[in-house]
Amino acid sequence: MTGTPRTVPALPPLARRLLAEFLGTALLVTVVVGSGVAAQQLSPTDTGLQLLENSTATVFGLAVLIVMLGPISGAHFNPVVSAADWLLGRRRGTGMTGSAVGAYALAQIAGGIAGAVLANVMFDLSAFQLSTKERITAGHVVGEVVATAGLILLIFALARTGRAALSAAAVGAYIGAAYWFTSSTSFANPAVTIGRIFSDTFAGIAPSSAPAFVAAQCVGGLIGLALVVVLYPDATATADNAVVPHGARPARQPAGPAHPGDPDRRERPGPG
């Protein structure tokens, strides 16, 4: 006796996914910046304790955001993750389209900036400010390469092995650990890096330091992708599951745009 085939939900409309990416990235930066300010106020003379408080809040906040928004957009909250999804899936027609990656990145960056402003306002600081915290050293750049490469490898290893449902716990745990084992405290995210420019607090980063961090994150993303391809050669077939499965793409349709206005709903080959 055979069971009823499981119905896979359709991919949510692009506008809803962009809202989820904006909201998720904004709240992530709010958690990072806000907990950093709180840590400074609660433990003003102990930098190690400040980092512990900041990293603990980030671990839990990120995990909750992935659970909450993952079914809508995949919970990327990170342009490097979105670009990796596109690069892995473009040969097989899985993953995102290039235009959708661009839209995700804009939503993520805007969300990162909004999240920093929100954290500033919550702690009665000037809403719009620029960080003066210089972070650029050779060690910090290497740390960002390592942190981002590990993040990409983790996300797509989970997707390839059918364990994407563990992403909330695993990604949160990885970022929490990387706060401590990398010299840069693991930004690993261009949108979060740009957002943190706009808060002159514990978690901030000076505008002059941000470009090198973003460049290092892009290099780390490419290294992570190379490791994914070598270790999990079939990862391209499961690119749609990054970070969290969030609906099936439509099968091939007759000529013409089946879903006008949604660049991620392009024609894709059906099974077989």
Image (tube, grey):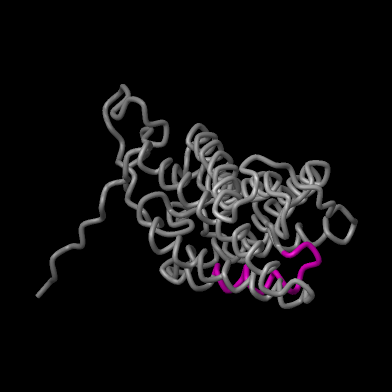
Classify residue 139 by image quadrant.
Answer: bottom right
Q: Residue at x 57, y 50 (%)?
A: 78
Above or below residue 11? Residue 257 is above
Lateral position of residue 213 relative to residue 1, left or right: right
Above or below residue 55? Residue 88 is above
- Range of residues picked out in magenta: 171-185
The residue at the far front in this view is 124
Q: Main secondary structure of the magenta part?
A: helix
Above or below residue 225? Residue 130 is above
Image quarter of the N terminus: bottom left
Lateral position of residue 193 relative to residue 170, left or right: right
Classify residue 6 by image quadrant.
Answer: bottom left
110 and 119: which is toward the camera: 119
Q: How many marks?
A: 0
Residue 111 within the magenta-colored segment of the rendering: no
Q: Could you tell me residue 25's position as x and y percent?
A: 52, 50
Lateral position of residue 29 relative to residue 202, left or right: left
Above or below residue 195? Residue 53 is below
Q: Residue at x 67, y 56 (%)?
A: 188
Residue 173 within the magenta-colored segment of the rendering: yes
Q: Residue at x 27, y 47 (%)?
A: 10
158 and 18: which is toward the camera: 18
Q: Could you tell me residue 28's position as x and y percent?
A: 54, 56
262 and 7: which is toward the camera: 262
Q: Could you tell me residue 137's position as x and y percent?
A: 89, 56
